[in-house]
Image (cartoon, rainbow, N blue to C red):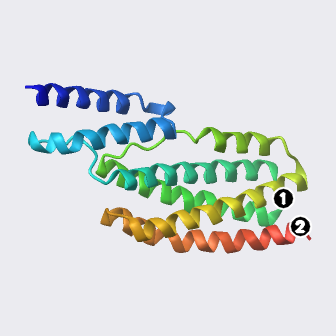
């Protein structure tokens, strides 16, 4: 009886956290929801149902971080289209919207199939980066955007390379393997633009 009561409490908590999502789901809330679902998975399986998460918690954490980064790339790219007059920067921004937008959709579909909660908004640090960048104009904006894109893409490539070696879920690994070459291409492309802007 205690197991059933505990199980019901954990399931209710997971559903409440999931339900709190909506447009205000942050990376922290998504991580908490996935942790709660991971805790319920083993017990729910013994009850003959599995409303819990269907991947390892580390894979879910990667999905949350990748979604956060992908949303931030698209948001900053849209800002670049508004603020930049540089043709190379605008071309790169359009590529970010297309490529990261597509990857974001694929990740959302994968997360839905695996019962992974993803953030609906970017993290506070990503939002602060966008807010700070929005205050810049002209060449100062272009340099700040290109510099941020180099740093973000180098960090993202490392995260994806690591995940390629440790991913437990085969579908998530396939997503990583498919997305990584595009991320590396973005990194090389923006590094060239950044170098040109800082001559």
Q: Residue at x 75, y 52 (%)?
A: 80
Coordinates of residue 176 in the picture (x, y in percent): 44, 67
The reply to whether the C-beta atoms of the residues labelled 2 and 1 are less than 8 Å apart is yes
Crowdedness near tag 1: few (<14), some (14–19) or many (≥20) residues, C-alpha within 10 Å: many
Tell me the CA gap for discs 2 and 1: 7 Å
Q: Residue at x 22, y 43 (%)?
A: 41
Relative depth, front residue between 138 and 56: 56
Task: Answer with the quarter of the image where residue 155 lies.
Answer: bottom right
Q: Residue at x 19, y 45 (%)?
A: 42
The residue at which mark 1 appears reads as: 143
Coordinates of residue 138 in the picture (x, y in percent): 89, 52
Mark found first going from the N terminus, 2 or 1: 1
- Judge from the rendering whether residue 34 lies leftward or rightward of residue 197; answer left or right: left
Q: Residue at x 42, y 71 (%)?
A: 165
Q: Quick one: quadrant of the N terminus?
A: top left
Q: Is residue 189 visible?
A: yes
Helix, strand or loop at label 1? It is helix
Q: Quick one: quadrant of the C terminus?
A: bottom right
* Residue 112 disc label: none
Crowdedness near tag 2: few (<14), some (14–19) or many (≥20) residues, C-alpha within 10 Å: few
Relative depth, front residue between 151 and 111: 151
- Judge from the rendering whether residue 76 lies leftward or rightward of residue 110; answer left or right: right
Does 136 appear above or below 170?
above
* Residue 198 disc label: 2
Helix, strand or loop at label 2? It is loop
């Amino acid at each position: 009886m205690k197991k059933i009561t505990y199980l019901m409490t954990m399931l209710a908590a997971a559903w409440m956290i999931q339900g709190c999502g909506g447009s205000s789901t942050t990376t922290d809330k998504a991580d908490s929801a996935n942790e709660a679902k991971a805790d319920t998975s083993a017990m729910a399986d013994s009850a003959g149902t599995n409303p819990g998460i269907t991947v390892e918690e580390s894979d879910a954490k990667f999905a949350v971080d990748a979604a956060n980064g992908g949303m931030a790339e698209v948001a900053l790219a849209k800002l670049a289209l508004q603020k930049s007059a540089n043709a190379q920067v605008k071309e790169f921004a359009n590529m970010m919207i297309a490529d990261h937008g597509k990857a974001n959709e694929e990740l959302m579909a994968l997360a839905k199939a695996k019962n992974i909660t993803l953030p609906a908004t970017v993290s506070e640090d990503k939002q602060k980066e966008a807010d700070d960048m929005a205050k810049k104009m002209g060449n100062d904006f272009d340099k700040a955007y290109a510099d941020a894109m180099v740093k973000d893409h180098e960090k993202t490539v490392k995260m994806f390379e690591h995940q390629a070696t440790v991913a437990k879920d085969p579908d998530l690994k396939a997503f990583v393997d498919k997305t990584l070459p595009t991320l590396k291409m973005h990194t090389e492309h923006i590094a060239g633009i950044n170098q040109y802007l800082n001559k």
